[in-house]
Amino acid sequence: KQRLATELVAQGLTVRFGGLTALNDVSLRVRPADIHALIGPNGAGKSTFVNTITGFYTPDSGRFELSGVPLDGLSPHAIAREGMARTFQNTELFGGMTVLENVMAGYQHRFTYSILDAALRTPRFLREEEDCRRAAIGLLEFVGLTDYGNEVARFLPFGLQRRLEIARALAPAPRLLLLDEPAAGLTVHEIDELDRMIRRISSLGISVLLIEHHVDLIMSVADQVTVLDYGTVIASDTPDEVQRDPRVIEAYFGG
Ligand code: ADP
Ligand code: MG
């Protein structure tokens, strides 16, 4: 594995919603190019963690950084520019656009053309659009959607929409990819394919934070596992160690 990739360090994150403490002093470290799973029962605070480190929620306390660059206090847009990309627990595609257009939308940050360039279809606009199209086709190939580029996104089977979301998240060339329950609703066969795709993403040198319920997938792909329960980290270790941890067995695996 390439070890040039980025490291995520979150320290002492606390997030409250009124009287509810969704995250309670959560510290977590994703090592460069690791596949790090974040697991825990429903309501444990996993999505809140993702929403916090992507800038959608403001923590009551704590800090987080990517490879030494502090990110707390930045907007979601600025955090994305620093190399953080995510998928959502509920797929959020542009349903009416084609598969290729959805991935091309992921490249928008790179464009330097103006609205006028686009309207007049100037050489600058045409060149950038062509570069973007070529890169997007490459990503469709990477996720196995080459044959679906011209399909309308909302008519894709569910499992392929999930792949498309991952392709779009990869478009800005992130250094850390956050996947929020990517296996939910997938068939056993599709979960196998997801397993391989996560490994391929990791082998590109991209760090992965995988929020999942699917224990087999976690134990298969994860280098490290952090377990949340009621907003608190109760374990963070290798999959083998975590599986043996009595607190984890009680909280998560149901004894
Ligand atoms: P998980 O993803 O582990 O299932 P969440 O992070 O979605 O858990 O939720 C953790 C807790 O925080 C839950 O009790 C949930 O109801 C609450 N919560 C999450 N987001 C919000 C919000 N925007 N407003 C109020 N409560 C929230
Ligand atoms: Mg969630």
Image: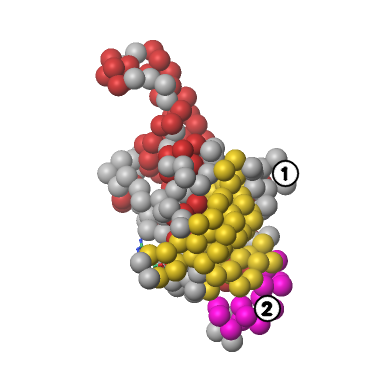
Q: What residue lies at 29% left-to-right and 17% top-to-bottom?
A: 116
- Is residue 243 covered in magenta? yes
Q: Amino acid at mark 1?
A: Arg
Is residue 137 visible in the rendered image? The answer is no
The residue where tag 2 is placed is 245
Q: From the viewer's perspective, is residue 119 above or below residue 85?
A: above
Quadrant of residue 90 within the rendered picture: bottom left
Residue 71 visible within the image: yes
Residue on which the image places disc 1: 3
Q: Residue at x 45, y 61 (%)?
A: 15
Q: x, y (%) of residue 33? A: 66, 48
Q: Residue 33 lies in magenta, yes or no? A: no
Report the front residue among 117 and 176.
176
Residue 114 placement: quadrant: top left
Residue 86 location (% of width, % of height): 47, 49
Crowd rating for badge 1 (residues with CA inside 10 Å; few <14, some 14–19, many 20+): some
Left or right of 255, for residue 150: left
Amino acid, disc 2: Asp
What residue range appears in magenta? 238-252
Q: Residue at x 67, y 73 (%)?
A: 242
Q: Residue furthest top?
A: 123
Q: Residue 210 location in percent, x, y?
A: 55, 58
**Left/right of residue 106 with respect to residue 116 in the rendered view:** right
Crowd tier of the residue under label 2, counting other residues whose Cα lies within 10 Å: few below 14, some 14–19, many 20 or above: some
Q: Which SS class for mark 1?
A: loop
Q: Is residue 178 above or below residue 44?
A: above
Q: Nearer the viewer, residue 181 or 246?
A: 246
- Using the image, tell me which numbered label, if any, was put on residue 223: none
User: Closer to the N terminus: mark 1 or mark 2?
Assistant: 1
